[in-house]
Image: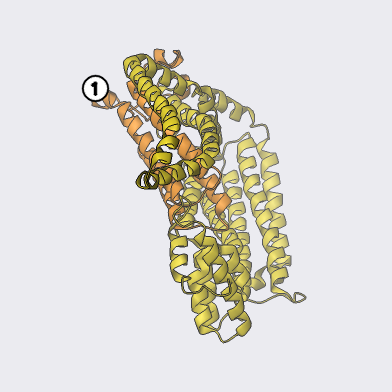
Chain colours: A orange, B yellow
């Protein structure tokens, strides 16, 4: 099996072009050219637009989520975060594998629970739990 | 993010989940300036647009300055109609001034937060700074940990299993009386009996799982080629399952006597999680899979269900149901307070059914408290369905305040 830590291949997160390419073997083509891995970050217009959207997300997080962790604001932030992530991945041609979708759904459901219940007694577990899969999977 | 872009060390959630997690923590910092570079790119691309934007903004600033000079004069010359329009606008701006400091603070906090989120996403997509740990190096490290001779591991596991068997046999009345719903001789208080035994058993369970992990990680002989190690793994996992079952029965005894609370529900759920892990350890002796992957998925599903199923509401409904059915001698209002507005509906049910004046008074205090607390969140971003329902249910309960 190939090894992502060697920067040679990735198992998932393949580009759409790669999947469509005739004769491309499963998991044997790099999602990003190997040479690009050590190059400095060179953004394109998609990154620019996404940067603006993420700035709005960061502001929403600081204003409504960070010091409160309750109510529908957390759900709105989660929806924005996950929506932005999936959209950005799509625009960048990265396909989310099945396991990625699992963690994404877990994050979405946990975020949705904040607009339903206060979950007293579960607050700290909920925040840590919400944050972990969001970072692990987004 | 790590999982969605295939950056996990083995391409999926594995026994290296801790390092994958740490990697996810480091990627945003390694790509912290990416968002600013993207902004700079936009600035270069859209120089004309940005220039036009600044021209308009400058016009607005000048309009504000001139407006500030002219408006007081116009108000002075006004016969009444203009003041009506301007007063509401001025009031709005005065209200906004109070929020300006907070907005600036939020923006300052929002900048690094956004840079962190963008760094994580862009870093994962561009695979920049994502390979902090190398799979081959880690596997070498894991192999270098295999220091203990097989005989040492077998002796250790054998003695520990033997110790548990002897201890359990000698403590049968103490440990297993909870299964039949009785306290052993010498214990007069349920809570003392259940609590003491419960935490002892939980500690032993944690030690056993650590021992299993350590023995399989440090043994020179790998599990696949050692039927003896497999047997000890199964034996220790079975003994741990027995301890978990005993701890669970103690908790059930406690809940049966005093009712449910979130603090009693969470350890019970945790015991179920530990039982799944032990069952996984047994299954691992026949099938090859990552035990930490099983733990991560099981833990995620269980906690997600807990968040969605409103445990505080479940606790309140359970206690109210048992109290009204006569199987619980008292109704603990303190548990309702700890659960917040989740207990409003069950509290109203008990309030309308009980004849105990003291309990009715306590419940009225609780309902008033929740009415005031949930009113604070009305029409704010921190409101939710539970608060809304609580406000509706307690709307006619405006007593004493």
Q: Which residue, as the protein is rendered here, is positioned at the far right?
A: B186
Q: Which residue, as the protein is rendered here, is positioned at the far left?
A: A22
Q: Position of residue B1 (x, y in %)?
A: 44, 34
Left or right of residue A32, residue A64 in this image = right
Whether residue A99 can be seen here: no
Q: Nearer the viewer, residue B303 or B340?
A: B340
Q: Dot 1 falls on which chain? A: A
Q: Nearer the viewer, residue A25 or B70?
A: B70
Whether residue A39 can be seen here: yes
Q: Nearer the viewer, residue B170 or A56?
A: A56
Write the residue at 52% across / 22% down: B30
Q: Position of residue B234 (x, y in %)?
A: 57, 51
Left or right of residue B225, residue B84 in this image = left
Quarter location, residue B401: bottom right
B260 vs B112: above or below: below
Quarter location, residue B388: bottom left
Q: Position of residue B44 (x, y in %)?
A: 37, 14
Quarter location, residue A105: top left
User: Which residue position holds label 1?
Assistant: A23
């Amino acid at each position: 099996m190939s090894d992502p830590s060697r920067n040679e291949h990735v198992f998932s997160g393949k580009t759409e072009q790669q999947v469509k390419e005739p004769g491309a073997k499963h998991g044997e083509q790099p999602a990003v050219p190997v040479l690009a891995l050590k190059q400095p970050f060179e953004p394109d217009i998609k990154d620019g637009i996404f940067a603006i959207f993420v700035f709005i997300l960061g502001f929403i997080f600081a204003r409504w989520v960070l010091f409160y962790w309750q109510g529908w604001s957390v759900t709105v932030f989660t929806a924005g975060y996950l929506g932005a992530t999936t959209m950005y991945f799509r625009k960048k041609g990265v396909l989310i594998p099945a396991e990625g979708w699992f963690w994404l759904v877990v994050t979405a459901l946990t975020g949705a629970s904040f607009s339903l219940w206060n979950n007293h007694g579960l607050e700290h577990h909920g925040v840590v739990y919400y944050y972990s899969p969001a970072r692990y999977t987004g | 993010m790590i999982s969605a872009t295939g950056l996990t060390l083995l391409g999926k959630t594995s026994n290296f989940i801790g390092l994958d997690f740490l990697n996810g923590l480091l990627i945003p910092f390694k790509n912290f300036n990416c968002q600013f570079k993207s902004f700079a790119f936009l600035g270069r691309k859209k120089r004309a647009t940005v220039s036009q934007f600044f021209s308009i903004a400058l016009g607005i600033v000048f309009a504000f300055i001139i407006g500030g000079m002219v408006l007081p004069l116009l108000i002075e010359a006004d016969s009444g109609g203009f003041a009506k329009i301007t007063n509401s606008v001025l009031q709005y701006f005065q209200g906004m001034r109070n929020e300006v400091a907070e907005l600036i603070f939020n923006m300052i906090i929002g900048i690094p937060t956004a840079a962190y989120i963008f760094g994580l996403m862009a870093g994962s997509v561009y695979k920049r700074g994502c390979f902090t740990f190398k799979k081959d190096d880690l596997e070498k490290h894991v192999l270098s940990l295999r220091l203990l001779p097989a005989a040492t591991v077998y002796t250790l596991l054998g003695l520990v299993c033997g110790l548990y068997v002897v201890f359990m046999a000698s403590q049968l009345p103490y440990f297993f009386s909870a299964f039949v719903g009785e306290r052993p001789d010498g214990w007069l208080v349920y809570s003392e009996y259940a609590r003491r035994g419960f935490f002892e058993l939980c500690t032993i369970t944690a030690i056993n799982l650590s021992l299993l992990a350590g023995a399989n990680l440090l043994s020179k002989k790998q599990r696949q080629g050692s039927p003896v190690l497999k047997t000890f793994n199964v034996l220790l996992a079975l003994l741990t399952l027995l301890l978990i079952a005993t701890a669970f029965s103690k908790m059930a005894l406690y809940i049966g006597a005093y009712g449910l609370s979130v603090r009693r529900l969470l350890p019970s759920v945790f015991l179920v999680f530990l039982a799944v892990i032990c069952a996984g350890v047994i299954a691992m002796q026949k099938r090859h899979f990552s035990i930490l992957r099983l733990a991560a998925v099981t833990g995620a599903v269980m906690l997600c269900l807990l968040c969605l199923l409103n445990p505080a509401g479940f606790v309140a409904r359970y206690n109210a149901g048992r109290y009204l059915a006569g199987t619980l001698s008292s109704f603990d209002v303190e548990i309702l307070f700890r659960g917040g507005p989740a207990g409003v509906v069950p509290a109203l049910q008990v309030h309308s059914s009980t004849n105990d004046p003291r309990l009715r008074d306590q419940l009225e205090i609780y309902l008033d408290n929740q009415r005031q607390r949930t009113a604070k969140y009305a029409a704010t971003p921190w409101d939710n369905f539970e608060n809304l329902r609580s406000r509706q249910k307690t709307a006619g309960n405006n007593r004493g305040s």
